[in-house]
Amino acid sequence: MKFKRLLPWIVPIVLLGSWQLFSSIGWISNRVLPNPIDIFTAAVELTKSGQLVADVWISTQRAFWGFVVGGGIGFLLGLANGLSKTAESLLDSSIQMIRNIPHLALIPIVILWFGIEEEAKLFLVALGTFFPIYLNTFHGIRSVDKSLIEMANVYGLKGLSLFLEVIFPAALPSILVGVRFALGITWVTLIVAETIASNSGIGYMAMNAREFMQLDVVVLSIILYALLGKLSDITAKLVEKRFLKWHPTYQK
Amino acid sequence: MTKDHKNEPILQLDNIVKSFDGKEVLKKIDLHVNKGDFIAVVGKSGCGKSTLLRIIAGLEEISSGSLLVDGTELKGRNQLAKMMFQDGRLLPWKKVSDNVGLGLKSEEKKQIPTILKQVGLAERANVWPAVLSGGQKQRVALARALIHDPELLLLDEPLGALDALTRMEMHELIEDLWKEKQFTAILVTHDVEEAVALANRVILIEEGEIVMDLPVHLPYPRQRDNPLFSSLVSQILNRIMGKKRKVEANLTTLAKTSTSASVRRA
Ligand SMILES: Nc1ncnc2c1ncn2[C@@H]1O[C@H](COP(=O)(O)OP(=O)(O)OP(=O)(O)O)[C@@H](O)[C@H]1O
Ligand SMILES: [Mg+2]
């Protein structure tokens, strides 16, 4: 049993060990890839100076607000279009048209509009998270089992109570898939936006370090992005577990 | 509702026609149902049984004819009726007791433990529907309908998905509750034996028309090995199957069709 739990760790640990070993004996040049201990030392030093925390904090804030704004709008429009045919015919085809533009292709024009201010990052992240949440909310509401709605009608549910007790819970699994997808997009968008147009945050830390050939800091920022991405994925999973307890997937 | 109300009609269907996209599914249905009756509706798949039940529930509008509920024309939902569906239609995100309490005011929710006890599910009040067996799910659905104390209980093949033993258990339960609460019941079923075991009137629909209306005068609880019981069953089966008359063989095919319809919801 214990061995089974250790199993997934073996390969990463061996890789990390050989990486350190090959760096120490000079097979991997420090100018190509700094070794794990150097990266760790860089992390400790940047933490001591406070820069690391400040940059991680600002990036997290951008991710959060971009996600809240874009996801929030996507959720509301998904609700509206899912619940009302009129809203759907008014809005859906326009939204689908905009969806064809990759949001990262807008970076040049976004820089022209907002410069490298916070609005630029907020706009891009919001745009990126909008679509997955919109689509999954819309689709989730549209695919609610009609027979359940009919049943609820027989038992006297309508209007708000029908929405809260039947339609929303039925759409929730799909909405949460959208949330997880959107969280992934949030970090990808932020990495690009901070690398190209920023003077703070993890991406800026990386680009700044690159100019001074601080390769350990560059690799550190890559790892930081990975950790933050993983962290938000874990959060999303916990949220799913909490709210989809009833779902057969979450029952032993 | 008390005994002296019997022989008063709760439902009067006259000349009911229902068509979907120009195709007549129900052609000319005349059916009067008295308070306290237990009516079973049988017929081949696609003959319009569910459609008839949905019309009575007010879930489907009639194309022509008249439908009186307690003497007044039905408009919109039938407020006297609660329906139990073949697939149960429990809300998977609500615990058993919340499913039963669906649409109730908090005052009325106090009845939940009592009704769960009546259907034999007192200990499962706090579990998700996903962990229940098929029979238990249908018990929840039955409790959800009965807690409203409906005057009219509509049952659309509620036991079609269950195995034979569980079905017998459910027959007993439904019979007991019907006797106790004295509601009027209309049961749609594929299973002719089930119809004869429960109903005091069996109605056969063929191609959108009532072609047989058979009173069943056997005392409850009904013994299936009673010769009268079996002769009623074969009478109905012979009528369904027309000239073929291979009653034994037909019995098994019917049993098979009703169980195979169930597998998809495992
Ligand atoms: N909403 C609908 N739109 C179009 N046709 C319908 C609709 N509902 C039912 N029908 C048709 O009406 C006919 C009768 O359907 P119904 O569901 O009443 O049959 P049934 O007797 O209940 O069959 P089963 O025993 O298989 O449940 C079928 O041919 C069906 O295709
Ligand atoms: Mg049917």
Image (cartoon, coloured by chain):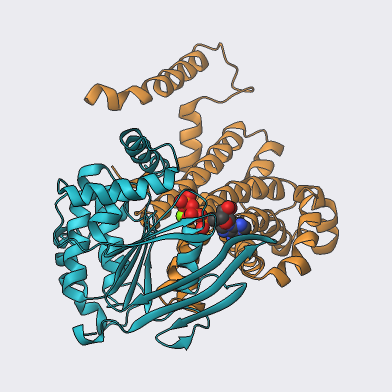
Chain colours: A orange, B cyan
Question: Quick check: can you spot residue B116?
Answer: yes
Question: Along the horizontal axis of the image, is B206 left or right of A222?
Answer: left
Question: Quick check: can you spot residue B193?
Answer: no
Residue B264 or A193: which is nearer the viewer?
A: B264
Question: Along the horizontal axis of the image, is B104 left or right of B47?
Answer: left
- Who's the residue at 53% across and 45% down the image? A229
Quadrant of the image for the C terminus of chain A? top left
> Percent from the top left, x then y, of residue A75?
60, 64
- Who's the residue at 40% across and 22% down the image? A13
Residue B35 or A152: which is nearer the viewer?
A: B35
Residue B108 or B264: which is nearer the viewer?
A: B264
The vertical placement of B226 against A11, above or below, is below
Question: Along the horizontal axis of the image, is A11 left or right of B60?
Answer: left
Quadrant of the image for the N terminus of chain A? top left
> Percent from the top left, x then y, of residue B120?
15, 60
Quarter occupied by residue B141: bottom left
- Who's the residue at 27% across and 42% down the image? B163
> Percent from the top left, x then y, of residue B242?
45, 43
> Percent from the top left, x then y, of residue A102?
77, 47
The vertical placement of A165 against A14, above or below, is below
- Who's the residue at 81% across and 52% down the image? A106
